[in-house]
């Protein structure tokens, strides 16, 4: 059975002091749900202090991005080893990175290989735009993103990957997909694409999350679906009571 997984993506929010305070507010509630794998992904500036704060709590820490090179003249970038010093997880290929910073399936693939090489658990984001959704290209898009983004990944370590399906038209808009529609994308397109690369047995073990305007009010609708193993939560992860309720809803 795939263990439920809920990650909070704080995006570009919270100073170090604010992040530390938010963790204090979250911890008691999150520690009460060990059946769910729980991960917080704050800005880079807070990783060092939060790694100490979350030590031995059972709550994981993730970065929101990394570069694929180990070091070098890449101003403003963060190397995989720098992430590994503080984190066990890393988000790769978020739609905002793809939209605003020209990330492609090819760069996602490089980052994924770099993360896996260091033992980081990657949360790889895929999903279609509104125009792709409206023209019926969802399946075509997510299959391409899987086949190119996960290219040349060793089957032996593929099960460490977490996939986050985030329909771009639902991110930060308040307009979530329905549970049934999201499940159909996972069942009919994403998991078969994973099986095409890694075989059916490995594909069945890879966790797939839903992301896109997940709230405490709609979380159960997604978590009750057969293929949805959790959520990548944006805005609601900055609200302690809301995020805790989402994690609780993911209990198996």
Image (cartoon, grey):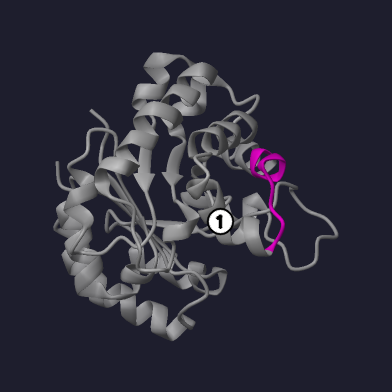
Q: Residue at x 33, y 58 (%)?
A: 176
Decide if residue 42 is in sight here. yes
Viewport quadrant of the N terminus: top left
In percent of width and height, residue 132 lies at 55, 47
Report crowding for label 1: few under 14, some 14 to 19, many 20 or more residues within 10 A (C-alpha). many
Whether the magenta-drawn stretch holds residue 107 is answered as yes
* As drawn, 192 above or below 165: above
Whether the magenta-drawn stretch holds residue 219 is answered as no
In percent of width and height, residue 41 lies at 44, 62
Viewport quadrant of the C terminus: top left
In percent of width and height, residue 229 lies at 29, 40
Image-quadrant location for residue 247: bottom left
Q: Residue at x 27, y 32 (%)?
A: 2
Q: Secondary structure at mark 1?
A: helix
Depth order, front residue of 2/52: 2
Decide if residue 94 is in sight here. no
* As drawn, 63 above or below 27: above
Q: Is residue 49 left or right of residue 205?
A: right
Q: Is residue 111 left or right of residue 122?
A: right
Image-quadrant location for residue 153: top right
Magenta span of residues: 101-109
How many tags in the picture?
A: 1
Q: Residue at x 49, y 56 (%)?
A: 168
In percent of width and height, residue 249 lies at 16, 54
Which residue is outermost to the front?
Answer: 135
Depth order, front residue of 77/71: 77
The residue under label 1 is 95
Q: Is residue 57 left or right of residue 113?
A: left
Q: Is residue 11 left or right of residue 110?
A: left
């Amino acid at each position: 059975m795939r263990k439920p997984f809920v990650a909070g993506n704080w995006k570009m929010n919270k100073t170090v002091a604010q992040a530390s305070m938010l963790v204090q507010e979250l911890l008691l509630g999150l520690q009460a749900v060990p059946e769910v794998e729980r991960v917080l992904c704050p800005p880079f500036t807070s990783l060092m202090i939060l790694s100490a704060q979350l030590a031995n709590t059972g709550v994981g820490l993730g970065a929101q991005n990394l570069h694929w090179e180990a070091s070098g003249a890449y101003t403003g970038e963060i190397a995989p080893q720098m992430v590994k010093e503080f984190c066990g997880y890393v988000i790769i290929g978020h739609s905002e990175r793809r939209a605003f910073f020209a990330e492609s399936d090819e760069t996602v693939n490089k980052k994924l290989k770099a993360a896996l090489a260091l033992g980081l658990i990657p949360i790889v984001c895929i999903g279609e735009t509104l125009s792709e959704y409206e023209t019926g290209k969802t399946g075509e898009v997510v299959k391409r993103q899987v086949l190119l983004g996960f290219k040349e990944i060793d089957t032996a370590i593929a099960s460490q990957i977490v996939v986050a399906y985030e329909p771009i038209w639902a991110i930060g808009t308040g307009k979530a997909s329905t549970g049934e529609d999201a499940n159909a994308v996972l069942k009919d397109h994403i998991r078969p694409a994973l099986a095409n690369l890694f075989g059916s047995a490995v594909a069945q073990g890879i966790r797939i999350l839903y992301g896109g305007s997940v709230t405490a009010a709609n979380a159960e609708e997604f978590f009750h679906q057969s293929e949805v193993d959790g959520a990548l939560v944006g805005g609601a992860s900055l609200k302690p009571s809301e995020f805790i309720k989402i994690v609780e809803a993911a209990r198996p």
